[in-house]
Structure formats: C-alpha cells, structure tokens
Image: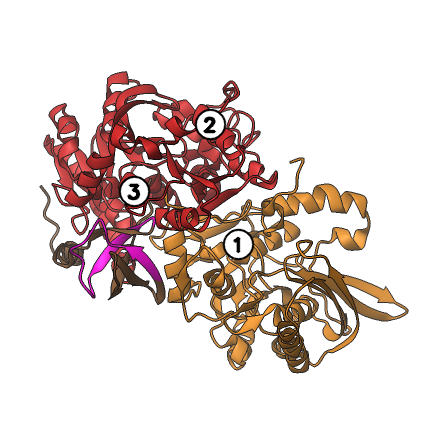
Chain colours: A red, B brown, C orange
Amino acid sequence: MKHLSEYRDSSIARKIIEAINSASKKKINLMEVCGTHTVAISKSGIREMLPSSVTLLSGPGCPVCVTPNCDLDKAIALAQLPDVILITFGDMMKVPGSYSSLSKEKANGYDIRIVYSTLDALKIAEENPNKKVIFFGVGFETTSPTIALSIVEAKMRNLKNYSVLARHKTVPLAMAALLSLGEVKIDGFICPGHVSTIIGSIPYEFIAENGIPCVISGFEPLDILQSILMLIKQIENGKVEVEIEYKRSVRPEGNLNAIKIMEEVFEPSDTDWRGIGVIPGSGLKLKDKYESFDADKNFEVEVPPTKDTKGCSCGEILRGVKFPYDCSLFGRVCTPENPVGPCMVSSEGSCAAYYRYGKR
Amino acid sequence: MCLAIPGKVVKIKENDIAEIEIGGVIREIGLHLAPEAKLNDYVLIHAGYAIQVIDEKEARETLKLWEELGIVETPE
Amino acid sequence: MEDKILLAHGSGGKLMHNLISELFLKKFDNPILAKLDDMATLTIKNSRLAFTTDTYVVNPLFFNDGDIGKLAVCGTVNDLAVSGAEPRYLSSSLVIEEGFSLSDLEKILDSMVKAAEEASVKIVTGDTKVVERGSADKLFINTAGIGIIPDGIEISGSNAKVGDKIIVSGTIGDHGIAVLSEREGFNFKTTLASDCAPLNHLIKEMLEVSQKIHCLRDPTRGGLASTLNEFALQSNVGIQIEEERVPVKEEVLGACEMLGYDPFHIANEGKIVAVVAPEDAEKVLKKLRQNVYGKDAVIIGEVTENPKGKVTVKTLIGATRILDMLVGEQLPRIC
C-alpha cells in the first residue's frame, strides 16, 4: 500500500540497524513519548535489534493511560443519567475506573456507543433529538481538532443535544514536566509524529534549548529506526536540535487550520495526568462562548469517591521510571484479561505492548 | 497516541466530505482540516478526518535516502 | 471471573477460552469434551463418528457473497471435515424473531440448500421457534452435524510435532472484514467478499496425498492467532511463523490499518490451517493449490520445541515477537 509498505522494507531496516550499531558509542536513554510508537516498536521487534548502548523508555503519551480514574468515573456517572447516550472512542471502553468500566456499564444496559469519528457522533445526535448525547473527549493534539470541529458543526447545525466532556491534553508541557521531575536521565526524545503534524516542530524548541535533542518520527519501522539513528548522531556529535524525520507529514508550522480551530473552541486548563499529577495549562477545556456544548457545565451528576488501585505501577511506567516487568503485578495479577491499570488495558499502554508482543 | 494512515482522495463531495481509498477500501472522511486536498492526493487520516496532505516530494526524498544507504554511508 | 457475560466472552479470544475451561468444562465434565477439539469423536459399535454443533448469530444476516444460511452449513461441515471426517448429515434449528421477512427467510434457506449440495450433505432434521419481537436479533441458526471418520485418520490439535510445517490455505481476514463493512457504524465500503465455503472436498483431497497431516482447523472467531495458539497449547509446542509469508489481501490490510485491527485476529470462514510433517508439506501444498479454495495456499512457519505453548512471529524487520490470542473483542481505535 502506498506510503505504508515502502516503510516496512526488511533489507533497508537491516541497513539502518547496521548504521545505528556503528554510530552508537555512548550509553543513552531515548524516550518515545507516544503510545503508538511504543506499540509500533514492540510489534516490529525494534528493541531487540538495537545495541545494548541504547535503551528505549516509554513516556506518558497514551491518552487512555493518563486519564485518571476520576474522569472515567464521571463519564460512567453521566452515562447512567436518564436519556443520555454516552459516546466514546473504542480505546476507552475497557479501561477500569474506580468501580467499573464503560464496557461493563454497557453490559448493564446503559446506552454507551463507540464511534470511529466525531462525524458519526454528530449523526447520532441528529438521529436522536430526544436524547442527550455526550461525547467523551479524550486525546492529544491529533484528536482535539476533530472534537473542536464537531462542536463548531453542532453549533452550525443548531444541535441542542450535543455536549463534550472535555478531557483533552497537550504533549509538550507533559514533556517539560517529566524533565523537571528529573527522575530519569533522558538523552533524547522520539517525538510523536501525528501530534506534530498538527502542532509542528516549534513547540519542542524549548526542549532542545534545554540541551536535549528531539527527532519527530513517523510510525513505520523504518521511520522509527531512522529517528533513532538521527538522535544517536546528534548525541555523538554534540548537536542539539529539533529535527523532523517524518517530513512527508510534519511541517515546522504544523497544520494551521487545525491549530486555528483548536484556538477557536478550546483554552488551556490545568489538568490531572495519571502518574504525574496536575500539569498547569496542559489540558484543553471549552471556551465560554461554547459553554452550551460543555458537559461539565450542562450536567449535574454525583460521582462516587475515586479509588486508586494498590500496587499498580502505571504512574512510574508512564514517567519512564520503571519498565512494565518491574511492576510486581505485571503478568501475574495484571494481565490483558484481568487488567489492574490502564497501561495493561489500553491498546497502546506500555504494559499491554510488552505483554502482548514479548517480554513477560 | 494517534493512529493515522495514508489514503488516496478518490472523490470530493460537498460540505467538506471526501471519499478516500486505502488498499481498495473506501470511506467517507472530513476534509475540514486539510481543505487544500485535491483529487488523487494522499492524505493522512485520523478519527475520520484528513489531518494533512502527504508531501509526495518529501516522501520520495526519504525513500531515496534509504535506497542510497547501501551505496553511500557517510560516517560523520 | 466477571459476574456478567460480556460481548468479549463470545469473540473467540482468551475470555471465551477461560469461560469454557472454568465453567463449561467443569460442569459438563467428561474426557471427550475436555479434548477441546472443534468436534467430538465418538466410537459407537466399531464406527468412529464426528459430532459437532455451532450456533450462528452473524450480523448483518446478508453480506458480500454469503449469508447466515451459507455460514450455518459451511461452518458445521468444516468443523467436521477438519477432524478428517466425511460430513454426512446436519440438523438445522432456527430461532426467528417475530416480524422477520418471509422472503429473507426463503433466501437464507435457499443458501443453505445450495451450500449443502456443494458439500454433499443432507439436512435431515430440524426445529423452528418464533420468539416475540425484541427477544432475538432477527434470526439465529444452530446446526449440528455428524460425519464418519475413516480408519487410520488421527487428526487433533494435540498432534503437532517439532519440525512440522504450518500451511494456511489462503488469504486471512476476508470474512471478518467483509462482514464488518456491512455493519452499521463502520461506514466503509469494499468489494471484498466473505470467503465462506465448504472445505470438506478440499480436505479429502489433502488426506488422499498425505497420512501425515497432524492438525487441521478452520480459523474462525479469533482468527489465525487463536488457532495457532490453540495448537501450541494443546500440543505443548512452540509455533513460529514469518509475517512476510502470511497472505493478506490489500483490502483487509487497509481496513485493519484504518480501524487499528490486527489481521491475525480476524475471522475466516473458508480457510484452513494445517500442521503437516515436513516431508509431506510440499505435496500437500501442491494439492491444495489445485483446488479453487486452496489456490493461494502457502507455508507460513513451523513447529518448534520452544517456547512451549506460545506462538512467535518473525517480523518484517527480522526481529521476533509473540503472537498472542485475542483477549476480548477488537474495538475500533484512534490511538
């Protein structure tokens, strides 16, 4: 398939791996911020092809994993209100909150539906004028513009029964928070290619100014290997800059249409990241002019007290401090069939990736 | 955190909706975030929307760089 | 275990397997059932019979190149055939929702007749129930089947030996994606057809050229990954396959990429996976390719000593990773 198969060529992969092996001298930690990268790395087996001098750490770039229990509990409470249709992306369905999950509540008879796109959510709202449709908005900057668009569309179509429970987050500030926590030595960042398609390369400049090289990577095996090579070369040569490997999609200025629509609908908010805590300004909430679409303002609901799971190391795993197999529950008590924390249940959680594809 | 895949624009409809084709599968998507996309362009699709037009020239250059890997490996 | 049955319990993955072993096997405790093959081998007087049953609940009822009727016949015929049995007779029980269209019912019955003719089986007994509107989703069909296992045939998921080759009879994921494309809410179009087909004649031809076919199964719910994992577990061996060799149609890859699905976990209804002694692999392959239902057959891997009970994949870039069984149901994702 065009723009996909070419980036999976095994003979080129071998050549890039040879180049990595000959260029790598210093012992370094590279962090892949994005959960989709973690999965791609695990699925293609890149980790085992790298020299021992290169360690890959997974970061907090799994929007499902960093959504705290209280947000899930609120979504569930909203779904349990009369005449509500709670709509979500498939990714959130199986994630355990303090007491239950969306998929369990669906089995209990509540109207919870999965969509692939907010365009489908709007259709559901139009087809069910007597129901209140609430969209559970989770995701980073790749997804937030699509949710912003749905709000603008809903306004244009005069849809009075559509709201969004806005729990979107932004990536660069989370990267900054990790650096200021200083728990783990990060020598370079593999930056998320699709978030960067929206925001461009400029938001990462401050990281390079703090002495840490960044390479914005695509998601195919060759993209990731090339990005690792680029980071190693920067580190070995003492260069520090933000480079774009994923040039076919990422422009330095990003996608201006998408940035504009996000700025039209959303404003920064302080938001809670599982495992990190509240990062000021790292969330996106609806501006006052769109408050009629804001589920936080439109619905009064009692949410039971949040319970956190004992023994779960998701927080430390999300910060790169622990590997999944360092968690005492990993593979024993916590498995994909019986997940304790979101890192195991999320389709791109580190624990799920490590468990499904290899290291147990 | 983002599954996005390349598809070819095979039909442009009204209201910013287009049909894209991936490996023979056709789906409707929104062009609102990439209004400059034209028929036969490849776009990156996420959650039912095109989020970028793929730059064919850059793609070709990346592939060329890799083809040359075996011939020219410049140690820096 | 969960205190409620979830959709995931029916999807052919780990949750379903756990339900079977922790509930059904305990309750219906007997050594024949405990073998966990797709059908039961019964010895009555001196004949060996294969006996199987399956219930079909596919949604939508009609899809590209098939419908629930065709599926109900082919699925049960195939479950018998993969034990080496010659399928002979089927029963057909219908649960019909009040208000169901009579002309649709006729179309479905016609499909069943056509499939039964192709498979050379007879539908000899049946049952029909109608339930109130809302008590069933349009139509459910259960078929049970009986076949005769010829002497000398010993095929079971527990017979894989180290060194055996793994053969798949064609492209994977066709049925699952064809059905998905017709389902509400997925909103994608494809010309991809379901691969639903009766495979008993194909299997008979294979068995005519080789006595060393150790395992046979049709990878339905849970896909190729489930079947390979079942073999590895039942036989207590490792299985390694090469990703590059597994045949997948472009449309299946395209739909999977879009939804974040894995082709290895998608259902097939007209394919078989065979585990064959290495000295017979090429001739079995050749025979398969002579049949329309096996024209794309290919060797995708082999049985290894270790890791026992696990399936590994050599990836496109040459590394090795685990191929796990599906846990619950695959859901479309954006991350």
Do marks 1 and 2 share a subunit? no
Q: Residue sitting at 66 percent across and 64 percent down?
A: C99
Residue at the spot of label 2: A74
Q: Amino acid at mark 1?
A: Ala
Q: Which of pointers 2 and 3 lies earlier in the amino acid sequence?
A: 2
Q: Residue sitting at 75 percent across and 51 percent down?
A: C34
Circle 1: element type: helix
Residue segment shown in magenta? B27-47
Residue at the spot of label 3: A155
Where is B59 relative to A323, above or below? below
User: Is residue A147 on the magenta stretch?
Assistant: no
- The quarter of the picture where residue C60 lies is bottom right
Crowding around mark 1 (Cα neighbors within 10 Å: few <14, some 14 to 19, many 20+) is many
Crowding around mark 2 (Cα neighbors within 10 Å: few <14, some 14 to 19, many 20+) is many
| Quadrant of image for the N terminus of chain C | top right
Circle 3: element type: helix
